[in-house]
Amino acid sequence: MTIETIIKTPQPQTDLRLLEENLGYHFCDRAHLQKAMVHSSYAFEQGRQMQKDNETMEFLGDAVLDLTVGHALFRHFPEMREGDLTRLRAALVNERHLARMATDLDLGRYLLLGKGEEVNLGREKASILSCALEAVAGAIFIDGGYVAASAFVERHFYPWFEDRQQTMFLADAKSSLQELLQERFNEGPRYVLEGEEGPDHHKIFHVSVRFREEILGQGSARNKKEAEQEAAAMALKNLARSE
C-alpha cells in the first residue's frame, strides 16, 4: 500500500493543497508532505501494509530548523551575543512554541492518526503537533532544498523573533545582567528590596538593582523574583542606551 493510497482512506485529512497554501510552499512531489502527515500510531495500525511514518522526517526537520532558524537569527541580529542567540533559537524551536505554530497552521487537521490517538485528542497534543511541524520542515528541505526551507522559516518564524526575544529578555534578564557585569568588571550586581505595599494576598514588591552603589534599574511586581527580573531588564536597557 503506497502513501498515496493511504491518503485516500477515510480519514479527516483534507486536501493537502489547502495545507500547502497555509505553509506558503507548493511541493514538487506532494508525497513528501503526505509522509510528513503520517503519525507512527497510524502506521502501526496499518501493520505491514504501511512501513512509513514521519519519524525520520521529523529527525531531519529538527536539524533543518536548528540550522535555518539559527542562520536567520544570525542575519537579523548580527550584534547579538552567542549565548543569547542560542537561547533565542531554543525559545523558537522548543516543543511548546512549535506546537503553537502548528496550531496556527491548522496542522492537526491534516494528520493521519491511529484510533487511540484520535480518541485521546492527538490532534491537539503539543508533542504530536511539534513533531509534525518538524516533519514538515524536513519534507520542505527534501523537496526544495535549503533555499525553500530557509524561506519557510523566514515566512513563519521571523514574525516571532521580536516576541520571543522580548519574552526571553525578561525571563533571562538577571542572568544576562550578571554575565555582562562579570564580563566587564568581574563583579556582579546586588538586588535591594526597597519596599512593599498592599495586603498580604496582593502585595507589590519594589526592588532596585545596584552595582557599586549605583542604581542601575528598578522593578515592581507581585513577588520578589519577578521584581528583580524587571529591575534587571531596566538595567540592561539603561546600560545599552549609555553605550
Image: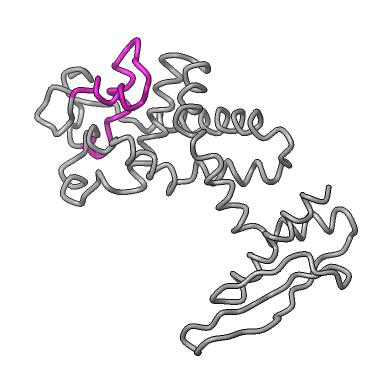
Relative to 27, residue 43 above or below: below
Q: Which residue is drawn at 56% across and 76% down?
A: 223
Relative to 202, residue 105 above or below: above
- Residue farthest to the bottom? 199
Which region is colored magenta?
Answer: 15-44
Q: Is residue 181 magenta?
A: no
Q: Which residue is drawn at 29% across and 35% down?
A: 107
In the picture, the quarter occupied by the N terminus is top left
Relative to 3, residue 77 above or below: below
- Dividing the picture into quarters, in which one does residue 26 lie? top left
Residue 84: x percent and y percent?
67, 45
Q: How many labels does the image show?
A: 0
- Residue farthest to the left? 10
- Dividing the picture into quarters, in which one does residue 218 lie? bottom right
Q: Nearer the viewer, residue 177 or 198?
A: 198
Q: Residue at x 27, y 23 (%)?
A: 34
Q: Nearer the viewer, residue 12 or 234?
A: 234
Examine the residues drawn in magenta and state their main secondary structure: helix
For this view, does 170 lie left or right of residue 9?
right
Q: Is residue 25 magenta?
A: yes
Residue 171: x percent and y percent?
59, 58
Residue 43: x percent and y percent?
23, 32
Q: Nearer the viewer, residue 103 or 130?
A: 103
Q: Which residue is drawn at 49% across and 36% down?
A: 159
